[in-house]
Image (tube, grey):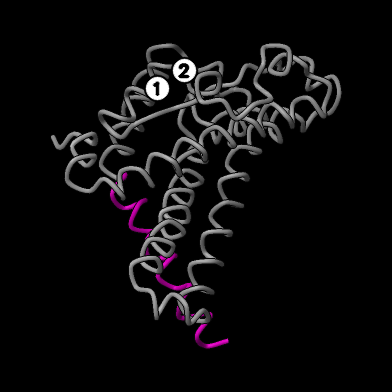
Amino acid sequence: MNLFILRAFTEPKTFFMLTLVVIFSICLHEFFHAWTALQFGDTTAADRGHLTLNPLKQMGPVSIIMFLILGFAWGAVPVNPAVLRAKNRHAPAIVALAGPATNFGLFLIGFFFFGFLQTRISYLIENKAAGTTILELFCILGCYNAFLCIFNLLPIPGLDGWAALTEYVPRLNRLSSEFAKGVTIFLIFLLLISIGRIFAVGFNLMMLAPEIFSAG
């Protein structure tokens, strides 16, 4: 297994950009979970200090260290579904989907600037070193946020897609523990063998950006 941290020595620029983009994206994802919950009257996350972009709060030291070493990270924000449902029956699902929606927004930003700058700004053509760095940053922003959006929407326990789905299909939470464990393990196995394909979707989407802007 290739350790992510080795890229700090072989590809320091890319390592820094990946670290910046992924940590920022996860923190913003969690921030909007907390902010959206607050709009529906659930102060749980706000009271615990999650209205911040501080990685130590949104991700925690273990997640940050895991990312720096292995390239894998997570975040978490506490919410009170009972308070949310009392305010609006759709609120728990909306709060759950606020995170992936944030990643989708960041994907659109990366998509726009990657396509626009690559086809419209002559500076990037004349200054290849700076241009390559800027384009790579926006490409990473788009690719990884497309991945985070798709990944978090998957209906797997622990992910936002599952939290939203179970609000409308509550019987899923009443499945027998053994059956639920079996399904969860199977879904996680499918996820692990599909991660490369999810990244490929994000990359292929980003490669469409220059074509769209050059045709415009």
Q: Decide: few, some or many residues near mark 1? Use Cα within 10 Å; few <14, some 14-19, many ≥20.
A: some
Location of the C terminus (image quadrant): bottom right
- Residue 123: x percent and y percent? 47, 77
Q: Between residues 121 and 74, which one lies in front from this camera angle?
A: 121
Which residue is the site of mark 1? 63
Q: Which mark is residue 60?
A: 2
Write the start and end of the magenta stretch as one range: 195-216
Residue at the (59%, 36%) spot, across then down = 28
Q: Between residues 30 and 96, which one lies in front from this camera angle?
A: 30
Residue 3 placement, left or right of 148:
left
Residue at the (61%, 28%) spot, across then down = 166
Identity of the amino acid at label 2?
Gly
Q: Decide: few, some or many residues near mark 2? Use Cα within 10 Å; few <14, some 14-19, many ≥20.
A: some
Q: Find residue 90 and report its image quarter.
A: top right
Residue at the (76%, 30%) spot, across then down = 91
Q: Between residues 73 and 134, which one lies in front from this camera angle?
A: 134
Location of the N terminus (image quadrant): top left
Q: Between residues 194 and 125, which one lies in front from this camera angle?
A: 125
Q: Is residue 114 above or below residue 40?
A: below
Q: In this view, does 181 lie above or below 195?
A: above
Identity of the amino acid at label 1?
Ser
Residue 199 placement, left or right of 78:
left
Q: Are marks 2 and 1 in contact (CB under 8 Å)?
A: yes
- Farthest residue to the right: give it: 87
